[in-house]
Image: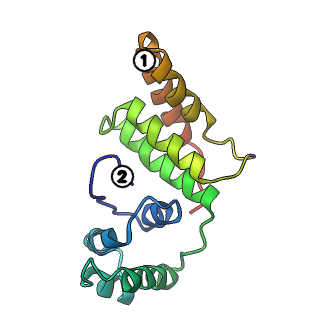
Amino acid sequence: MTAEGEPNIQDVAVAEALWRLGLLRSEQLPNVAISLLESGVDSRSLRILAATPAHTNYEAVALLEQALRELNKGRMSKRDAALVYAKWIASRIVNNELHPLRGAALIADAALRVDDPGFHDLDPFVYAASESEDRPEDRDMFSRAIAAEARRILSMPCAE
């Protein structure tokens, strides 16, 4: 999910990443479709999804999957989804829209959802999120380190 409440997703790759990681509920999909349409992303199924009542979960899921195909998306792995999501969260950290410790916790959660013991790309965030809980006296240091890692990850290429 997003850091606070209902998502305002304006990038189809971020929407797909959230979906692949299980961070969106089906009843949120119509609002995600509305956000994407408002940002200029368009497809027939996305327009239908935006008008779909939130309680029609099965239809919403099918429409999202169809919209992703129409937009030449829909093949994102969980690993790539975690990296796309991490970059999105990192940008929010760097832009002071999200506290670094909260951002690290969100990224750590996404890393765990990859469910691959060989996936270590986001370990600095996982470590910082874990250690900052046990070391409150070092939270400022962890916040600075997380912000630095967020800037670093934003400079890396990302598969979308």
**Residue receiving disc 1:** 139
**Tag 2 secondary structure:** loop
Residue 6 x %, y %: 27, 58
Q: Position of residue 131 (x, y in %)?
A: 53, 22
Q: Amino acid at mark 2?
A: Thr
| Camera sees residue 154 | no
Name the side, left or right, on which 30 lies relative to 45: left
How crowded pointer 2 is (Cα within 10 Å; few <14, some 14-19, many 20+) is rated as some
Q: Is residue 107 left or right of residue 77?
A: left
Q: Position of residue 23 (x, y in %)?
A: 44, 58
Query: Which quadrant of the figure has residue 43?
Result: bottom left
Give the CA separation, mark 1 to mark 2.
Answer: 22 Å
> Of residues 33 and 38, which is closer to you in this image?
33
Q: Which of the image's four quarters has the C terminus? A: bottom right
In the displayed image of the protein, which residue is found farthest to the top?
Answer: 137
Task: Please indicate, yes or no, whether residue 53 appears anywhere in the rendered image.
Answer: yes
The residue at the point 57 percent across, 52 percent down is 113
The residue at the point 75 percent across, 46 percent down is: 118
Taking the view exactly as shown, the residue that stands out farthest to the right is 118
Give above or below for 127 relative to 64.
Answer: above
Mark drawn on residue 23? none
Which residue shows up at 70% across the image and 46% down it? Answer: 119
Residue underneath mark 2: 2
| Most foreground residue, 15 or 109 | 109
- SS under mark 1: helix
Amino acid type shown at disc 1: Arg
